Image (cartoon, grey):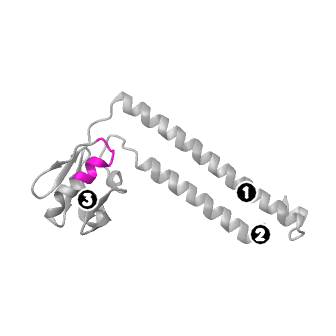
Amino acid sequence: MDKKTYQEIEKNMEKILEVSSKTIGNLRAGKASISLVDGIKVDSYGAQLPLKQVATLSVPSPQLLLIVPWDKTLIEKIKTALSASGLGINPIADKNQIKMPIPPLSEERRREIIKIVKKLGEEAKIAFRTERHRGNNSLKDLEKEKKISEDALH
């Protein structure tokens, strides 16, 4: 197999796997995780900065996410960004920190997560299949151009 083609296919498949894993990891599964707030940006100092660049994030207990901003004036902006994020969790702001209690999963939410994971799995399978077909087609093209032998193709 052409080394460049193989490396390109491998890189694309690793990217598919990474994106799928990250997406599934971001689903709220009933316990606190810093990955829940990974994609949240906060309007601070005239720019949209990731939450982890303006605050310390910690998980003191399985049902609580604690956010301690380095600049206390950002507490309201962080709270607003968290509320607008669509996580469905209400942040509670004290004067120095923000607490995000994670409610236990309801049966309805569990079923919804199962559907989402199945859908993401199917999308990943389709992406892998598409990438594999693309690789096979590029190998067949190389064989037609006589750059590789028929034996190397199979």
- For label 1, the residue is 134
Name the residue at 26% across, 47% down.
83
Q: Position of residue 145 (x, y in %)?
A: 88, 68
What is the spatial separation of the Cα atoms under label 3 and label 1, in whole angstroms? 42 Å
Q: Please, what is the three-letter code of the amino acid marked with disc 1?
A: Arg
Report the Cα–Cα distance between label 2 and label 3. Answer: 46 Å
**In the rendered structure, does residue 127 fall within the stretch colored magenta?**
no
Residue 66 seen in this snapshot = no
Q: Please, what secondary structure does the residue beneath circle 1 have?
A: helix
Of tags 3 and 1, the one toward the viewer is: 1
Q: Which residue carries the number 2 mark?
A: 2
Rate crowding at label 2 as few (under 14), some (14 to 19) or many (20 or more) other CA atoms within 10 Å: few
The answer to whether 3 appears left or right of 31 in the picture is right
Sequence-wise, the earlier of marks 2 and 3 is 2
Amino acid on which disc 3 is placed: Leu
- Mark 3 neighbour density, 10 Å: few (under 14) some (14–19) many (20 or more): some
Q: Tell me where residue 65 appears, x and y as whole percent.
A: 24, 50
Q: Earlier in the sequence, mark 1 or mark 2?
A: 2
Where disc 2 sits, the SS reads loop
- Indicate the amino acid at tag 2: Asp
Q: Earlier in the sequence, mark 3 or mark 1?
A: 3
Q: Residues within 10 Å of mark 1 (few under 14, many from 20)?
A: some
* Residue 21 in the image, given as x and y percentages of width and height: 49, 52
Which residue does the numbered mark 3 point to in the structure image? 57
Q: CA distance from mark 1 to mark 2?
A: 13 Å
In the rendered image, the quadrant that contains the N terminus is bottom right
Q: Residue at x 21, y 47 (%)?
A: 91
Q: Nearer the viewer, mark 1 or mark 2?
A: 1
